[in-house]
Image (cartoon, rainbow, N blue to C red):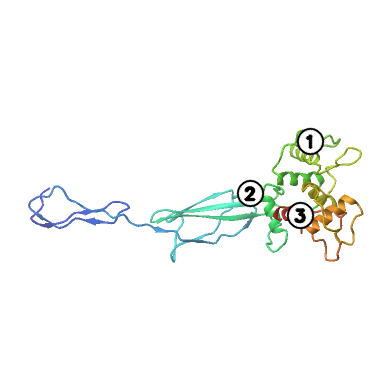
Amino acid sequence: MTLPEGWWRVKYEKEGYETAWSDWMTVPPLQTEVNIGLTPIEKMKIESVDGIIDKQFTGKTIRQDLVVKSGEKVLKEGTDYSLSYSNNTNIGKATVTITGKGDYTGTIEKEFRIQFKDVTDKNQFYYDPIYWAVDGGITTGFADGTFKPTNGCNRAAVVTFLWRMAGKPKPTKQASFKDMTGNKDFDTAISWASEKGVVKGWDDNTFRPWNTCNRAAIVTFLWRYAKQPEVGSTADFKDMTGNNDFDKAISWAAEEGITTGWDDGTFRPWNTCNRLAIVSFLYRYESD
């Protein structure tokens, strides 16, 4: 190529860099080498993510309607950032990761919770205990996405909650109760609880795993799990049982703040212990 005489300069463009120009040059003579300094384009950072909310279980993957900004500019998904999710189907903690692309850089990770359909009110006293139990692998709830907090809980399930809270320790052998369940987790939990003296069963050598667990029994299981600590005084509930172990356990649980009983001054030891109460007792014990 022949260049006419005069002053010339060279323009250079490269993706990711600002457009650059050489110094002015005279022609002739023909310049065969030109020095051009390149300056990288400084990408803007993703600075804020709004719109994260906890959502109820649906059985399908759950996404968030996000507002992602750099400064005051609202960015566009696919052009300015990409989204990736993890654990966003089942009940528990889910994560969304926002990663800049194009002219934007940076990564922001946000957590949200997929809730049980029947445990959504954060003002309820049992909200935190239930999700603590979920996050700790102590309970998973039911396949329909409910926890059924007011349902009673059978003895097999109660000791399994305790066993999971303890880290799923392995017993040295299977318990000798005549009515073991045939379920691997239940039987391992019952065997561990029996070996550790957490449960004793009945004089006829049964455990009665499918019987509902009353309130006196669950606090006694916990008391034995805690190695039967002594208490300063007997609790002043109006309906103490008269059973030495039960009353020690109830008094210990009251002293430790694990239970507060009812406003009428009763503990109601023979009432069925529902699921929300059981995980609340465990949560308070572990939080002590």
Q: Which residue matches tag 1?
A: 182
Q: Residue at x 78, y 49 (%)?
A: 222
- Image quadrant assignment for residue 205: top right
The reply to whether discs 1 and 2 touch (Cβ–Cβ < 8 Å) is no
Which x, y percent locates residue 247? 87, 54
Q: Which mark lies nearer to you, 3 or 1?
A: 3
Give the residue type at disc 2. Asn
Q: Quadrant of residue 155?
A: top right
Kindly state the secondary structure of the residue where label 3 is placed: helix
User: Mark 3: few, some, or many residues within 10 Å (few <14, many ≥20)?
Assistant: many
Position in image of residue 274 (x %, y %): 80, 54
Q: Label 3 amino acid?
A: Phe
Judge by depth and name the residue closer to the eye, 194 or 68.
Answer: 194
**Is the Cβ of the residue at disc 3 closer than 8 Å to that at disc 1?**
no
Residue annotated with mark 3: 281
Label 2 sits on residue: 90
Mark 3 or 2, which is nearer the eye?
3
Give the foreground label among 1 and 2.
Answer: 1
Query: Going from the N terminus, do you reach mark 3 or mark 2 first?
Result: 2
273 or 2, nearer to the observer: 273
